[in-house]
Amino acid sequence: MTVSDGSPHVNGGAATESSTLSLDDGDIYVCQDGLRDAPALLLIHGSASSTRSWDPLVPLLTGSHRVIRIDLLGHGRSAKPADRSYAIPDQARRAGAVLDRLGVEHAVVGGHSSGGVVATALAEQRPDLVTALALINTGPSLDAFIATESAAIGLSQWPPTDEQLRRFASTGFSRAGYKIPEEFLDDVRGMTHQSLTMSMRATRSYLEQRALPDRLTVLGKPLLVIFGEDDRRWRSSSASDYRAVPGARVELLPGLGHSPLLEDPPRTATSLLAFTAIHAVRVD
């Protein structure tokens, strides 16, 4: 079943069609922008985020793509059940089911942070569906993680205070004092304690099993890695680990942190569009 929220709404000048798809283990919120017969580009947000994290970037992509975004289970406007799995393979399976429901047969898949981990799992499960991968500030392994006190904020107390939320979110950007979008904080507030902690543990578990460059080498998919050089969550020097993947394109963005899609959408879009122009599959 598909439930529409009514009429399209405007996001940064681009019309967004949103709906809710009812899957077997929960409702998934979906946004679509751009022409429906354009090459599909699926964008997957990171932990404690939502489709809204892509809002500044989407208008720069719709001229050449059918841009599809989802709220992963437990996030944003999707369901947050207490009795369902938040494991990375299950989140990837749901993403694939959404594309199937939308009639998408081939897509470039982009992911930010842990969204890149979900994108990788989707390519593992559905190599027929995923034509290429673009990972934005996705740590290649747990060795690249920068442990900070703020990373644990909100895990022992729920709901967290506004000050705790801001400390938790601060490392998501390149500089101290960056004005964190209120929508970002709302996304964290809107999660349950279980959906937040289980989602973060799921990413850790997946990376513990096998590092992403090893998984991607086996897949053989075209790969773009974008990394803000001033990332405060994952060591930007770890981006070089992805060079082990044959043909991988690795781009470091000076002056940007963990969230280039929010900190500098035009620069992020330039890299992404150059990649998709080569690897996107046009609809017959």
Image (cartoon, helix red, strand yellow):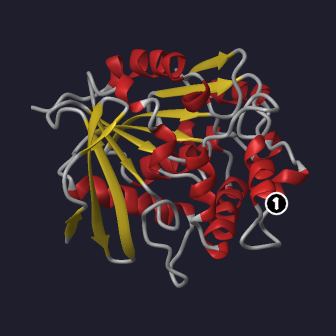
Place residue 97 in its image quadrant: bottom left
Q: Residue furthest bottom?
A: 83
In this view, the residue farthest toward the right is: 149
Q: Quadrant of the C terminus?
A: top left
Name the residue nearer the viewer: 10 or 66: 10
Can you say whether 273 is above or below 26 in the image? above
Number of numbered discs overlaid on the protein picture: 1
Quarter of the picture containing the N terminus is bottom left
In terms of depth relative to the viewer, which is nearer, 120 or 57? Answer: 57
Q: Name the residue at 38% across, 23% down.
A: 60
Instruction: Determine whether, in the image, residue 48 is placed left or right of residue 230.
Output: left
Q: Position of residue 110 (x, y in %)?
A: 46, 37
Q: Compared to 86, does 37 lie above or below? A: above
On the image, numbered disc 1 is attached to which residue?
Answer: 153
The structure residue drawn at horizontal position 73% and vertical position 47%, both measured from the top left corner, is 169
Q: Is residue 74 toward the left or the right of residue 207 in the image?
A: left
Image x and y of residue 174, in percent: 75, 29
Where does residue 214 sit, x and y in percent of width and height? Answer: 63, 41
Judge whether 42 appears above or below 244 on screen.
below
Where residue 189 sits, quadrant-wise, is: bottom right
**Secondary structure under the numbered disc 1 in the rendered image:** loop
Between 119 and 18, the one lying in front of the other is: 18
Please give the name of the residue rendered at 79% of the width and 28% of the height, measured from the top-left corner.
175
Residue drawn at 55 percent across, 39 percent down: 216
Q: Does residue 86 lie above or below 226 as drawn?
A: below
The kind of residue on which mark 1 rests is Ile
Q: Residues within 10 Å of mark 1 (few under 14, many from 20)?
A: some
On the rendered structure, is 23 left or right of 231? Answer: left
Where residue 41 appears, x then y in whole percent?
Answer: 34, 36
